[in-house]
């Protein structure tokens, strides 16, 4: 149960640059569009309510690896070498979501993934146990409704690359685009503001995202700690969002005690107990907490195992670190988001100044003043993530942020960012 105070500038600066600032506006269809009439990199204005920022560690993957290597926390160490983007495209170059991609080595080891809305999955072959010093040749096979494709690739170098799985036919019509949206919410005593923000988010999703073309299914897992009356409580996926919002309206902050909470149990329940749909084109889980997980529990689930399972099932974890989160919690949250292709968000206290989590003074770069993260109201950032996933269905799946080089290290006109 973390106290609601901002982190020190030292803890904030550990986040490092990861993405250009953005203050989204909405199109008439309810989708995000770049700001009009002004610099697209401008610092967002002041907001009422819970403010939050966001960074993407896959867009600045090398910096993230350095961050992990330099951390002295007892997080789960993962070998992230030789990152590979598995991209399933149809004959027209469109990404193919909800496609199963199996990866195997020359022996008996194999694993599989479900592609996300972009038609991509992220493979870390050493972390998955598919690669060793003697086994560096892998085969990926895509099995989709439209057909199949196969590619053999090697891991002779540890740099990024793309495994292009090109189908011989066009992508089948997606019909109504189903989005599975889950919240994994710490509901211990210090989380009242974030709980209120989640309730607002559900109402906003119901208002602007559920259309004839899109069906949003919302589920929620609240968790506490072993000393509380319950550890996890699961609210199954529902499509009647106003009714679901009414059902979770009674959730309130309470319990906790020591700093860590049983986040591992909450994540495990979300991945294993919620009924994720085989029809969904996007599967997103937002893990929201102000305290790190108990890593000293020896008889329960492990976040590293469940983040792998989430990755395999096409569930992207978007983590939200409320202010007061300690260094271990920051590392764990960034790990979960990065490994599954999500992003990490953080609650801002006192604006975007140096005392804000992940903050720091604004910098001038690429022709405009910006901070190194996207910022806004927490509920708006969450809704933006859903919109971006829906946009990814029709975007170029081969345009990948952070491929071969960190975005922050690229010339300004070559950066892949939030405005794509």
Image (cartoon, helix red, strand yellow):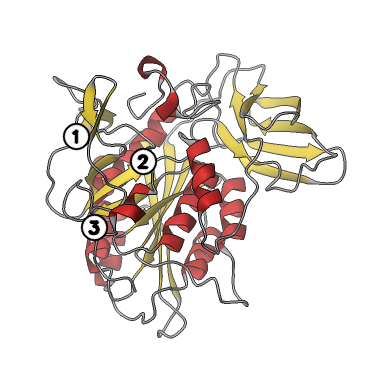
The residue that label 1 is drawn on is 43
Residue nearest the viewer, comparing 97 with 414: 414
CB contact under 8 Å: marks 1 and 3: no
| Residue in view at x 37 percent, y 38 percent | 17
Give SS at disc 1.
Answer: loop
Decide: marks 2, 1 in contact (CB < 8 A)?
no
- In the rendered image, is residue 210 in sight? no
Residue 101 position within the rendered picture, expressed as x and y whole percent measured from the top left: 67, 36
For marks 2 and 1, give the one nearer the viewer.
Answer: 1
Choose between 20 and 220: the one closer to the eye. Answer: 20
- Up-down relation of residue 235 to residue 286 (above or below): below
**Mark 2 vs 3, N-terminal side:** 3
Label located before the other in sequence (2 or 1): 1
* Residue 267 spot, x, y in % from top left: 50, 62
Q: Is residue 214 above or below residue 356?
A: above
- Dot 2, how many residues are within 10 Å of its Cα: few (below 14), some (14-19), or many (20+)? many
Name the disc covering residue 395, or none.
Answer: none
Residue 56 image position (x, y, % from top left)? 42, 40
Q: CA distance from mark 2 to mark 3?
A: 16 Å
Secondary structure type for disc 2: helix
Work out whether residue 193 can be spotted: yes
Q: Quadrant of the C terminus?
A: top left
x%, y% of residue 364? 24, 27
Q: In the figure, 234 relative to 137: above or below?
A: below
Number of callouts: 3
At x 28% / y 31%, what residue is drawn?
31
Q: Which of the two residues, 245 or 21, is positioned nearer the viewer here?
A: 21
* Disc 1 versus disc 3: nearer the observer: 1
The residue identified by callout 3 is 197
* Residue 360 in the figure: left or right of residue 287: left
Residue occupied by mark 2:
386
């Amino acid at each position: 149960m973390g106290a609601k105070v901002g982190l020190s500038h030292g803890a904030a600066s550990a986040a490092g640059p990861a993405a250009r600032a953005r203050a989204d506006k909405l199109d008439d269809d309810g989708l995000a569009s770049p700001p009009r009439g002004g610099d697209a990199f401008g610092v967002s204005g002041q907001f009422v309510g819970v403010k939050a920022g966001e960074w993407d560690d896959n867009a600045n993957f090398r910096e993230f690896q350095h961050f992990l290597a330099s951390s002295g926390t007892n997080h789960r160490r993962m070998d992230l070498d030789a990152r590979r983007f598995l991209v399933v495209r149809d004959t027209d170059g469109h990404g193919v979501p909800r496609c199963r991609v199996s990866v195997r080595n020359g022996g008996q080891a194999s694993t599989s993934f479900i592609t996300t809305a972009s038609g991509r999955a992220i493979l870390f072959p050493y972390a998955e146990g598919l690669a060793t010093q003697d086994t560096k040749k892998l085969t990926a096979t895509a099995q989709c409704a439209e057909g199949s494709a196969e590619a053999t690739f090697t891991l002779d170098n540890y740099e990024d690359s793309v495994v292009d799985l090109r189908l011989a036919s066009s992508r089948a019509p997606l019909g109504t685009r189903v989005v599975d949206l889950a919240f994994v919410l710490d509901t211990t005593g210090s989380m009242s503001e974030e709980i209120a923000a989640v309730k607002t988010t559900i109402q906003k999703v119901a208002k602007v995202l559920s259309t004839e073309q899109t069906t949003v299914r919302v589920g929620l897992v609240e968790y506490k700690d072993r000393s509380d009356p319950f550890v996890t409580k699961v609210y199954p996926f529902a499509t009647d969002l106003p009714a679901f919002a009414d059902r979770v309206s009674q959730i309130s902050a309470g319990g906790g005690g020591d700093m860590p909470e049983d986040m591992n149990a909450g994540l495990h329940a979300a991945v294993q107990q919620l009924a994720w749909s085989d029809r969904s084109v996007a599967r997103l889980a937002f893990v929201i907490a102000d305290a790190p997980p108990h890593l000293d529990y020896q008889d329960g689930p492990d976040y590293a195992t469940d983040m792998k399972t989430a990755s395999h099932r096409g569930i992207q974890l978007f983590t939200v670190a409320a202010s007061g989160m300690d260094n271990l919690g920051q590392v764990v949250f960034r790990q979960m988001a990065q490994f599954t292709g999500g992003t990490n968000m953080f609650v801002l206290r006192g604006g975007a100044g140096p005392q804000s989590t992940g903050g720091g003074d604004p910098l001038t770069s690429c022709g405009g003043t910006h901070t190194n993260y996207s910022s806004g109201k927490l509920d708006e950032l969450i809704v933006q993530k859903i919109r971006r996933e829906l946009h990814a269905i029709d975007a170029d799946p081969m345009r990948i942020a952070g491929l071969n080089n960190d975005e922050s290290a690229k010339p300004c006109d070559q950066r892949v960012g939030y405005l794509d």
